[in-house]
Image (cartoon, grey):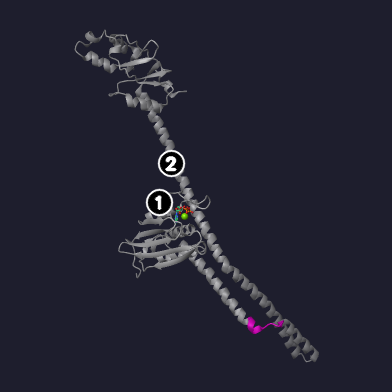
Amino acid sequence: MSVLRAFAANIPCFKPTDTINTVADAFLSATYKNCLSVAVVNEHNQPVGMISRHQLNDIFLKKFGRDLFGERAVSDFMRKDVLAVDVDSSLSTAAAFISANMVFPLSEDFVLTENGCYLGMAAVLHLLSAMEKQISQSSAALNRAYKQLSSSQAQLVQSEKMAALGQMVAGVAHEINTPLGYVNNNIEMVREFFGQIQFIVQAHEQLSDTLLSPDTTDIDIAESLAALDDAKMDMDLTQWFVDLDALFNDTFYGVEQISELVTGLKDFSRLDQAVTDNVSLNDCIDSALLIARNTLKYKVEVIKQLGNIPKVRCTGSQINQVLLNLFTNAAQAVKEKGYLLIKTWSDASAVYVSVQDTGCGIPAENLSRIFDPFFTTKPVGEGTGLGLSITFKIIQQHGGSVRVVSEVGKGTRFVIALPLTQALSAAA
Ligand SMILES: Nc1ncnc2c1ncn2[C@@H]1O[C@H](COP(=O)(O)OP(=O)(O)OP(=O)(O)O)[C@@H](O)[C@H]1O
Ligand SMILES: [Mg+2]
């Protein structure tokens, strides 16, 4: 049911030929007590004009107003552009029409029509308060929607972080798996060798027992010697010991690699360090590179030109996340093989990190959008489009800036600047 129908007050209307006096008298009666204006309708009941209390006052306040004009037809004085709204209109259409056509001061009501015919009078004030109610309802709904949106965005950022963590963990797991594989193999081989040695030691023990026994015959000795020969199985023991030494070296190397990765992981996450610290960006680059090694190694050759830069007061784990994002993007932008050039330098006010790749580049029309949350050109499931928006936010929170230049087909360069305001010198 139309909202406006509830506004319709059943106020009798006038004919164009009714006199000003008739209308003025009507305004004084109880029926019209609350009316600011009334409608004038033609013989088909269609509104053709409106006249307001305010207009009548103007007429009667004139010298001899009632005598001069009282018997004149209302059509001579009425407002002809009727403020008429169809009863089926929406509140907002009605409000827009009334506010565009109403005359000030606010001294008129408006006419409600149904199929072009007079239905009743309605008050502008009622319309305004209904609109206000509607606006406050929709602003409450908007507020709710905004809150929902912020919370789902926070969830998405969280899941992006988890996805990045998942990728990182998978990369590191792969890196650990290789040395773990050959450490495992080596231990298998040592175990086999150990089995052989056990046989030989047993055969030796048996031979020495035979030799020491007073009842030993030559045949016994010959049998023990034959058993020892069998245990040796033509093994070149000297060569075996050389091999074993190499196996141990290899194994230690593998274990060292694994422990380097684990330390790298700890450095990357900086779990054991203060949240905000004086951090060397060169160290951050190394630890992010270690973590990204699996993503980078088949695609890009990494060239580092790291300057002697002062430490910066920052949240190292976040800077690591930024660098990992940039390195991952660079590797993803390179189709088959390319370069990743990482430079650092500083001036009196800031420390700079440049991450440049020889990947596909970013088209000019996308450059202004890459920092927007959810902007991605990668297939569903491969990119969420949150990497750079998180990067931007982190650098902004550190009071720094991110700049990007790119050429399609040539590559992309991101330059991050972190202010030195609270920096310590490298020597310190
Ligand atoms: N080094 C780069 N070379 C070419 N295009 C890039 C590079 N870095 C970013 N882009 C473009 O910017 C877009 C947004 O990057 P962003 O890191 O925010 O999201 P994503 O990499 O698509 O997804 P996510 O990081 O969430 O996995 C990318 O989809 C890509 O089109
Ligand atoms: Mg990314």
Q: How crowded is mark 1: few (under 14 residues within 10 Å), some or many (20 or more)?
A: few
- As drawn, the label of residue 364 is 1
Q: In this view, does 425 lie above or below 117?
A: below
Secondary structure at badge 1 equals helix
Of residues 28 and 213, which is closer to you in this image? 28
Residue under the image location 62 percent in, 71 percent down = 185
Viewport quadrant of the C terminus: bottom left
Secondary structure at badge 2 equals helix
Q: Name the residue under label 2.
A: 146
**Does 233 appear in magenta?**
yes
Q: Kindly indicate the quadrant of the structure image that contains residue 315.
A: bottom left
Question: Residue 122: x percent and y percent?
Answer: 37, 20
Q: Is residue 235 visible?
A: yes
Q: Comparing marks 2 and 1, which lies closer to the viewer? A: 1
Q: In this view, does 40 lie above or below 154?
A: above
Of residues 313 and 303, which is closer to you in this image? 303
Beta carbon of the mark 1 residue lies under 8 A of ligand 1: no
- In space, the residues marked 2 and 1 are separated at their CA atoms by 31 Å
Which amino acid, by three-letter code, is at mark 2?
Answer: Tyr
Does residue 304 appear left or right of residue 104 in this picture? Answer: right
Which comes sooner in the sequence, label 2 or label 1? 2
Q: Residues within 10 Å of mark 2 (few under 14, many from 20)?
A: few
The span picked out in magenta is: 232-240
Of residues 398 and 294, which is closer to you in this image? 294
Q: Kindly indicate the quadrant of the structure image that contains residue 105.
A: top left
Question: Residue 343: x percent and y percent?
Answer: 39, 65
